Image: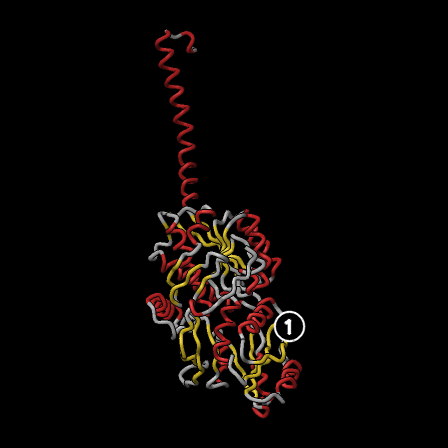
Amino acid sequence: MTTDSLAPNVRRVVRRAATGLVAGAVLAVSWPLALAQAGAARDIRIAHIHSKTGPLEAYGKQSAVGFQMGLQYATGGTMAVNGRKLVVIERDDQGKPDVGKSLLAAAYGDDKADIAVGPTSSGVALAMLPVAEEYKKILLVEPAVADSITGDKWNRFIFRTGRNSSQDAISNAVALDKAGVTIATLGQDTAFGRDGVKAFKEAVKTAKIVHEEYLPAATTDFTAGAQRIIDKLKDQPGRKVIWIIWAGAGNPFKIADLDLKRFGIEIATGGNILPAMSAYKQFPGMEGATYYYFGIPKNPVNEWLVANHYTQFKTPPDFFTAGGMSAGIAVVEALKKTRGDTTTDKLISAMEGMSFETPKGRMTFRKEDHQAMQDMFHFRIKVDPAFAWGVPELVRVIKAEDMNVPIRNQR
């Protein structure tokens, strides 16, 4: 029997019922899909691209631990902002610029990351900057240091919680820039090393710099470079200092084995990770400046970090752990300001001029170049048998507002 053989009023009822069944079937299929899509939309996807392997592996691993701890701290353990879950996508750039560049493009394009954080290496960061501009999404740089990242290579999608070369240089110059001091620099032949020395030279106003020595990042034998430095310094009057800026593999402090003391030559450098600072025990009384040492800052965020890091890992948090945590806190605080909205322009508006508390103390993103302005710490090395490293004791806090950090971008 067909509906045509039914009475008109019955036919209408049958058709309405059939339509309802079809609509119900469509709803039964589409409703779970809609729920799934809504659930996916609630997730905020954060790509963390860093050196899980490669020459800066130790730095990258610390940064990853700190970033997760920063998210946990800033969200009160919920790992969500405004009801939206935070999902972290970790990727290994291996310390290679081409790998980092392709990973960031894949994160924005394929993984649909709302924001990216990293990388560890300055060379990798410089390769990644144009990708952020192409996709018009934020890259929060941590911990890559080169000035050019927030300088001449910068674009409006770049923010940085990590310190830059100028902040390192200005703070280290505090300890060395005095009348009668002659300095030679020893740095890696990388963006990190060259930008660091350039900034240091600009920061030094009174001391005299007579030589710059750049060596490959993979250098293990520093003898030839050290001899060139010694030749430049040995006949200089007054205090003579080799200022070292080095990251990752290699131990430039082995140049102390060349008996520098017979020429009256000292070594100076900035802070580093704890394993690298084991070499500092050779230099009691050495002064410099550091980005972070767990025993220096006195604030609630650092207290939380130290206590929780000891609980989880039975060790103190290290140099780049604090940086990673600062980046995690910055991401959450920005998302809180936008109420979980990940629209790039809204995030930029929220982050420009934004202040937030970190293990180091308060940081503020400078509006002009999005560099986080932050305190640095002038230290003097003390040898304590209880520690495997030279202990940096605080001489004084170099406040962010006391450092005239140049604005180097072309904005």
Amino acid of disc 1: Pro
Q: In the image, 208: left or right of 162?
A: right
Spot occupied by residue 390 in the image (x, y as percentages of width and height)? 45, 81
Nearer to the camera, 401 or 133? 401
Nearer to the camera, 354 or 409? 409
Q: Is residue 291 visible?
A: yes
Please tell me which residue is depicted at 40% across the width and 38% down the height of the picture. 35
Q: How many marks?
A: 1
Q: Quadrant of the C terminus?
A: bottom right
The residue that label 1 is drawn on is: 216
Q: Quadrant of the N terminus?
A: top left
Q: What colouring does the structure picture have?
A: secondary structure
- Secondary element at tag 1: loop
Spot occupied by residue 352 in the image (x, y as percentages of width and height)? 44, 54
Spot occupied by residue 307 in the image (x, y as percentages of width and height)? 34, 69
Q: Residues within 10 Å of mark 1 (few under 14, many from 20)?
A: few
Nearer to the camera, 26 or 118? 118
Q: Is residue 150 above or below residue 272?
A: above
Q: Is residue 409 above or below residue 215?
A: above
Please tell me which residue is depicted at 51% across the width and 49% down the height of the picture. 137
Please tell me which residue is depicted at 55% across the width and 61% down the height of the picture. 408
Q: In the image, 394: left or right of 193?
A: left
Q: Is residue 401 above or below residue 349?
A: below
